[in-house]
Image: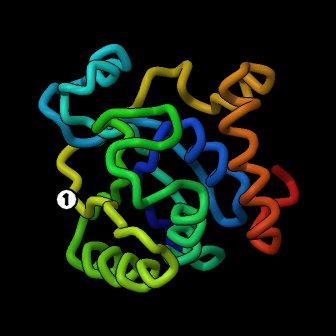
Amino acid sequence: MAKQEIILGGGCFWCLEASFQILKGVQEVVSGYANGSLPNPTYKDICTGTSGHAEVVKVVFDDDIIQYEDILDVFFTIHDPTTLNRQGNDIGTQYRSTLLFQNQDEEELYYEIIDEKQESYANEIVTVVEELDYFYVAENYHQDYLRKNPTQGYCRMVVAPKVTKVHQQFSEMINDTF
């Protein structure tokens, strides 16, 4: 087993977290905040849109079972990478589409995948590829959000449909024991 991690953002982290948790080979998904100007930011800090942080998830996975490319396929399917600082009604730089690299190989892969994916979009992909400076774990109530709050309105209207989309388009990658 070769344990890897990828950190990415594309709108609200609850949507990303729930979508990646159901994949075979994914061992852990942690909601958090990346980069920005404040050390140890809170959700309240992030919501101002002025801290420079992005809502992200850290996905820890076994690359003997699932590859970076598979995770990126899901990522580009469950959010719109052509909208700047916005996913649906979630608006602000904290919701930017971003891929955070920790080494040169990741950076090169991200640009390569974006170039490949661009052919599928009429509008330009605005996903930001940026070096990871900091990752801060979000407050506990943000972790496993869909599992803890399945009947909450946002979960039913926004998060659950994205999870359903992953089930439909990536059925061979779904962890049946989830």
Quadrant of image for the N terminus: bottom right
Instruction: Say which amino acid is labelled 1.
Output: Glu
Q: Is residue 17 above or below residue 115?
A: above
Locate residue 76, reporting x and y percent. Answer: 52, 65
28 left or right of 68 in image:
right
For disc 1, the marked residue is 131
Foreground residue among 45 and 40: 45
- Colour scheme in use: rainbow
Q: Residue furthest top?
A: 44
Examine the rendering and report whether any part of residue 1 can be seen.
no
Residue drawn 69% across and 49% down? 162
105 left or right of 175 in image:
left
Q: Residue furthest front?
A: 122
Residue 114: quadrant of the picture = bottom left
Q: Residues within 10 Å of mark 1 (few under 14, many from 20)?
A: some
Q: Is residue 98 above or below residue 158?
A: below
Foreground residue among 154 and 32: 154
Q: Label 1's element? A: strand
Foreground residue among 174 and 50: 50
Q: Residue furthest right?
A: 176
Foreground residue among 159 and 146: 159
Locate residue 16, reporting x and y percent. Answer: 56, 47
Residue drawn 26% across and 26% down? 49
Tell how many labels.
1
Examine the rendering and report whether any part of residue 95 can be seen.
yes
Residue 98: quadrant of the picture = bottom left
Residue drawn 29% across and 41% down? 34
Q: Is residue 115 above or below residue 22?
A: below
Residue 50: quadrant of the picture = top left
Q: Is residue 45 above or below residue 137?
A: above
Locate residue 21, reporting x and y percent. Answer: 66, 50
